[in-house]
Image: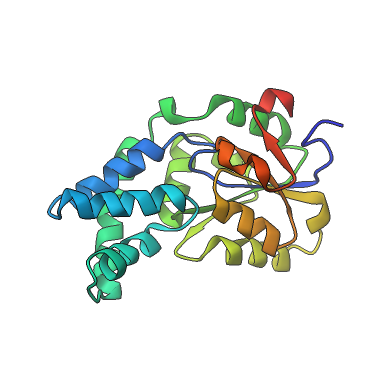
Amino acid sequence: MMALEKYTTFFWDFDGVILDSNSVREYGFKKVLANFEEKQVNQLLDFHRKNGGLSRYVKFRFFYEEVLKQAVTAEKIDELAASFSEIMMEELIKPKYLIKEAVVFIEQHATKIPMYIVSGSDQTELRFLCEKLGLSDHFKGIYGSPIPKIQLVKTILEENATIIPAQSCLIGDSHNDWEAAQINKLDFIGYNNEALKSVGTHYLNSFDES
């Protein structure tokens, strides 16, 4: 049996799985935090790389509380996140960032198998990008931060009784994706991050093998 053949519902991460956006995200953090020391920003980028599935809200809070050792208000976090989102929406609407093999798989199967996006990206931004990139119609729902991914998956399962967790999988490229799948009792399919080969149900080197 092919790796993905048995599943009746797919949950998808977005960045690094459907959209090759990681370098653009890093640029966005550098741009928004341009007034801070490079050494401090690099600490945030390291945290970002290790926690791809976490939201920018968590990452900006980490920057202030753990790197700068300063208290930060929710309003300031929202301000930083909004500035970051403006940069993302301007750049990431370009089709060149789409991961073509993933998009082809989605296009081939979305009419037969329910699919959801659960992402650490801002939900408003995420839906904007999916609309501009022609992806929206392929998904039953597109969900993002500031709600954590674990809770996003949990809510979808609670609101859709026909979804059987044991017959569903989450495709992601980060440890946070694996955690969201594990806690919600979904299979986890790692992709685009070889560090995930030792965890989850299966590692997908390419959608051609799916």
The answer to whether residue 163 is visible is no
Residue drawn where x is 24% and y is 71% of the image:
69
Residue drawn where x is 82% and y is 31% of the image:
2
Count of picture labels: 0
Seen as rendered, the residue at the extreme left is: 35
Residue 130 vs residue 89: left or right?
A: right
Q: Position of residue 46 (x, y in %)?
A: 36, 49
Colour scheme shown: rainbow
| Quarter of the image with the C terminus in it | top right
Residue 78 vs residue 208: left or right?
A: left
Q: Is residue 80 above or below residue 8?
A: below
Q: Is residue 21 above or below residue 65?
A: above
Residue drawn where x is 72% and y is 68% of the image:
158
Nearer to me, 124 or 30? 30
Nearer to me, 89 or 53? 53
The answer to whether residue 32 is visible is yes
Residue 139 vs residue 68: left or right?
A: right
Q: Position of residue 20 (x, y in %)?
A: 45, 34
Seen as rendered, the residue at the extreme right is: 1
Residue drawn where x is 29% and y is 57% of the image:
82
Nearer to me, 199 or 74? 199
Q: Position of residue 32 (x, y in %)?
A: 21, 51
Find residue 159 and report its image quarter.
bottom right
Residue 91 vs residue 204: left or right?
A: left
| Quarter of the image with the N terminus in it | top right
Q: Position of residue 77 (x, y in %)?
A: 29, 67
